[in-house]
Image: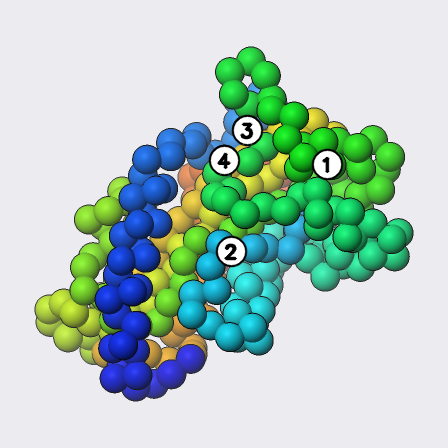
Amino acid sequence: MRDSTDRFAWRALPAVLTLALLLSACASQTVATGVRPVYQGARVTQIAIVPFYAQSNFSLDAQPFDRLIAHYESATQLWLERVGFDVIGSRAFRHHLTELGLWQAFSDGVSLRNSLAGYFERRGAHQTASIEVVTLKEMAADNKLPATNLLFGEVLYHSEGICRVDARRFTDYAKTTVMADAPDTLPRPCIVSHFQAKLVDAPSAQTMWFNRSMREVHTGILDEALSSETIVTTVDLTLGSKAGLHQLLPPSSDAHPEQQSATSSP
């Protein structure tokens, strides 16, 4: 995280091109959001968070990248706990499988390298017998997983740099906020946070719920606090919108609307 916009100028063009390509790809891949019809009556109390992934390191070194992914995981766990789910965090998930000597097998079998939107989906009347589907089904059948309901997350894009275009030009679910201290016109210093998550029923390896959101915050000065706040807001919007995970809570645990997005948008 940096506090000088000049330091980001060299990354501006690659960032814009990468963002445009990502948004174009997302726009061309139509995937239903919210709870899937077959699970509309399902009730979920416990969720295990599978370690999140990204298709790019966003020009970050290993340690800053790991901290970024961990921040998205932490924000997700906090939201789930706040609305009433019993949560097994990503570290606990990995520790559980490591203790059983199965973490490497899980990592090899459920190695997600493309958009999360395309995984654990039916194609017509049948589900593709891909390696991640087979791995989940086998581990669930052998009672090796710490929970039945697994939450996968992908950080599609994250950057602190210069925005030369408004993300709303590329996708209808992008939300842009222009802070009071931001320049009047583009280009502007900005934070871009793009995230998607999917809840999967492990025994069937089928998607129960899916959603995604994108936040673009234009500001005058880039700082760590604003970046952190943007991540939390993006996660809250993904999990707690009208298509949010709260729909799967038992009636006695349903969150009030104000709990679904307790963090206000920056």
Residue 250, above or below 266? above
Residue tagged by mark 3? 121
Q: Residues within 10 Å of mark 4 (few under 14, many from 20)?
A: few
Is tag 2's residue or tag 3's residue first in the polypeptide sequence?
2
Residue tagged by mark 1? 136
Is tag 1's residue or tag 4's residue first in the polypeptide sequence?
4
Disc 4 + disc 3, Cβ < 8 Å: yes
Please tell me which residue lies in front, 107 or 173.
107
Q: Residue at x 66, y 51 (%)?
A: 50
Marks 4 and 3 sit apart, C-alpha to C-alpha, by 6 Å
Residue tagged by mark 2? 54
Q: Position of residue 148 (x, y in %)?
A: 74, 38
Residue tagged by mark 4? 118
Residue 194, above or below 35? below
Is tag 2's residue or tag 1's residue first in the polypeptide sequence?
2
Is tag 2's residue or tag 4's residue first in the polypeptide sequence?
2
Disc 2 + disc 3, Cβ < 8 Å: no
Disc 2 + disc 1, Cβ < 8 Å: no
Please tell me which residue lies in front, 218 or 15.
15
Name the quadrant of the N terminus. Answer: bottom left
Marks 2 and 3 sit apart, C-alpha to C-alpha, by 19 Å
Q: Circle 4 — which element?
A: helix
Inspect the image, locate mark 1, and give the three-letter code of the amino acid beneath it: Leu
Q: Circle 2 — which element?
A: loop
